[in-house]
Amino acid sequence: MAFGEFEVDESYFGGRRKGKRGRGAAGKVPVFGILKRGGKVHTQVIPDAKGKTLMPIIQEKIQPDSVVYSDCWYGYNVLDVSEFKHFRINHSKLFADSQNHINGIENFWNQAKRHMRKFNGIPTKHFHLFLKECEWRFNNSNPRRQLKQLKQWVKKHMG
């Protein structure tokens, strides 16, 4: 559990499909992310973006009295009556208001989607692994350190 300022956001991954887009779009994989400002991101695949799904994840990763920034999605209403200091950004009006923004986590979603697009379709049963790879790359952004860690893993596990 960490203390500080955090950005939370849900996103949906999947190919371009006709019909509904964004939240609730059929056939897309819902994911949730928590970004500690100036720190690391945590992601996970979720069954839905309801408050009862999101709150246990938030409580597991963020210490009480921390500041949590979100958009106006109704799933975050649970934060209004919680032990967190909750601020919302209304994207229909503006994207940032001083410290009140979720640009960091949205930047992560953009990077992850750009990276995964290269694979031209990822089987749903393996999607969580690709998401964790994106999380690892974001949290370990130095390419030299990434290569060093990968070499250590290969040496350890491949003997």
Image (tube, rainbow, N blue to C red):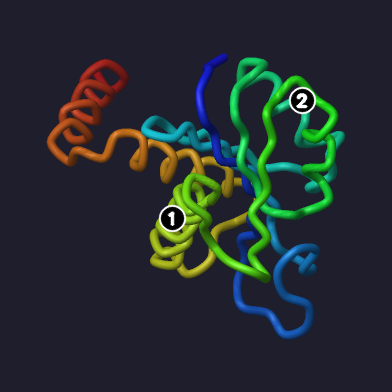
Q: Nearer the viewer, residue 8 or 69?
A: 69
In x, y percent, where is residue 133? 42, 41
The residue lying at 83 percent from left, 51 percent from top is 74
At label 1, which amino acid type do we have? Answer: Asn
In x, y percent, where is residue 51? 84, 39
The residue lying at 47 percent from left, 36 percent from top is 41
Quarter of the figure that contains the C terminus? top left
Q: Secondary structure at mark 2?
A: helix
Give the residue furthest to the front.
98
Occupied quadrant, residue 43:
top right
In x, y percent, where is residue 16? 61, 78
In x, y percent, where is residue 46? 73, 42
Occupied quadrant, residue 86:
top right
The residue lying at 52 percent from left, 55 percent from top is 97
Q: Nearer the viewer, residue 104 or 57?
A: 104
Q: Is residue 121 above or below residue 57?
A: below
Q: Disc 2 marks which residue?
A: 56
Residue 107 is labelled as 1
Q: Nearer the viewer, residue 77 or 49?
A: 77
